[in-house]
Amino acid sequence: MPKLYIIPTPIGNLEDMTYRAVRLLGEVDMVLAEDTRTSQVLLKHYGIERKLYAHHKFNEHASAEEVARQIEAGRSVALISDAGTPGISDPGFLLVRTCLEHDIDVETLPGATAFVPALVQSGFPCDKFCFEGFLPQKKGRKKRLAALADEPRTMIFYESPFRVLKALGEFGEVFGMERRVSVSRELSKKFEQTVRGTIAEVIAHFEAHPPKGEFVMVVEGANGKDSKDDVDDNE
C-alpha cells in the first residue's frame, strides 16, 4: 500500500539484512538511497532489481515534498541509507516529518544500527543512555561536551577514525582521564574490535595502534563505578 518504509541495512555484514527488508525492497515502487552506488551493491547481492533514486543530505530538502507527492499518487517508497537505520545520523528525519505532515503512513522496520551493539558490549549501564551521534567537527564541539560534563547516563558518540584521538583527548579534558570508555570499530565486520579502559589507557592504545575503520565511542556516565578495567583488545 502507498506509504513510506524506513528500511535498515547492514552496518557491515550482509547477513544482518532481514527477510522482511529484502521482500519490501523488491516490492516497493521506489527505493531512495543515500548513495546509489553503495546501495546497488546491496540490492545486487540479494537479487533485487530496482532503480535507485538519490536522497541525501544535499538534496533532501528539495526531494522530500516530491517524494510525498509520489506516495499521495499511490506509489510505495522505501528509504535506505549506506548502512544502519535511516534517520540515525543519516538522512531520513526530514522525509519522515514531511510525510507525517501530509498524513502519509510511515512504517519503520527494526534492524541494524551501530550504537546498540557497541553500547551493550561496553559493559556500561544500558537501561538509560544518551546518544549524541557525531560531535560538531569545529564550532560548538567543546560547548557540546561541556554540557555533558555531569551527564549521569552512558553516552554514545560516532566518530571518524581521523578524529578518534582528538575526541578521546577532549573527553579526558571534560570528563577526566580516569573516566572509563569503550571504543568499538568495524562492528559486524572481519576486523571488529573493542578497546575498553580509562580514557588515558585507550588513548595510549590508539597512539600505538592508529585508528582505522568506523568507530562508536561509549563513555561511562558521571555516576559510574570508580574501579577501572584493563584495556581489552579483542579482534
Image: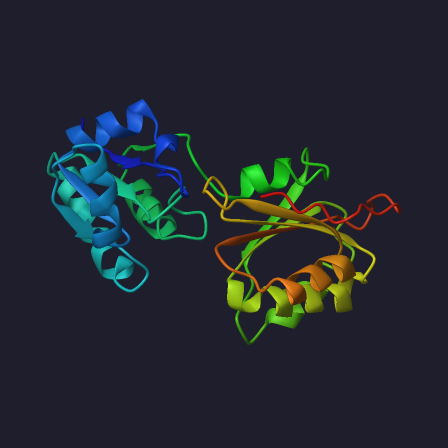
| Residue drawn at x 16%, y 47% as measured from the top left | 52
How was this image coloured? rainbow
How many numbered circles are shown?
0
Q: Quadrant of residue 159?
A: bottom right
Q: Is residue 147 above or below residue 85?
A: below
Please give left or right for residue 186 compared with residue 109 in the image.
right
Q: Position of residue 101 (x, y in %)?
A: 31, 44
| Residue drawn at x 69%, y 59% as measured from the top left | 205
Is the C terminus in the top left, top right, bottom left or bottom right quadrant? top right
The residue at the far right in this view is: 226
Q: Is residue 143 above or below residue 8?
A: below
Of the pair 75 and 16, the residue shown nearer to us: 16
Please give left or right for residue 62 compared with residue 138 in the image.
left
Q: Quadrant of residue 174?
A: bottom right
Q: Position of residue 209 (x, y in %)?
A: 61, 62
Decide if residue 144 is in sight here.
no
Is the N terminus in the top left, top right, bottom left or bottom right quadrant? top left
Q: Position of residue 163 (x, y in %)?
A: 56, 68
Please give left or right for residue 92 compared with residue 186 in the image.
left
| Residue drawn at x 63%, y 67% as measured from the top left | 165
Q: Is residue 174 above or below residue 103?
A: below
The residue at the far bottom in this view is: 139
Of the pair 101 and 64, the residue shown nearer to us: 64
Q: Quadrant of residue 204?
A: bottom right
Q: Position of residue 109 (x, y in %)?
A: 37, 30
Decide if residue 103 is in sight here.
yes
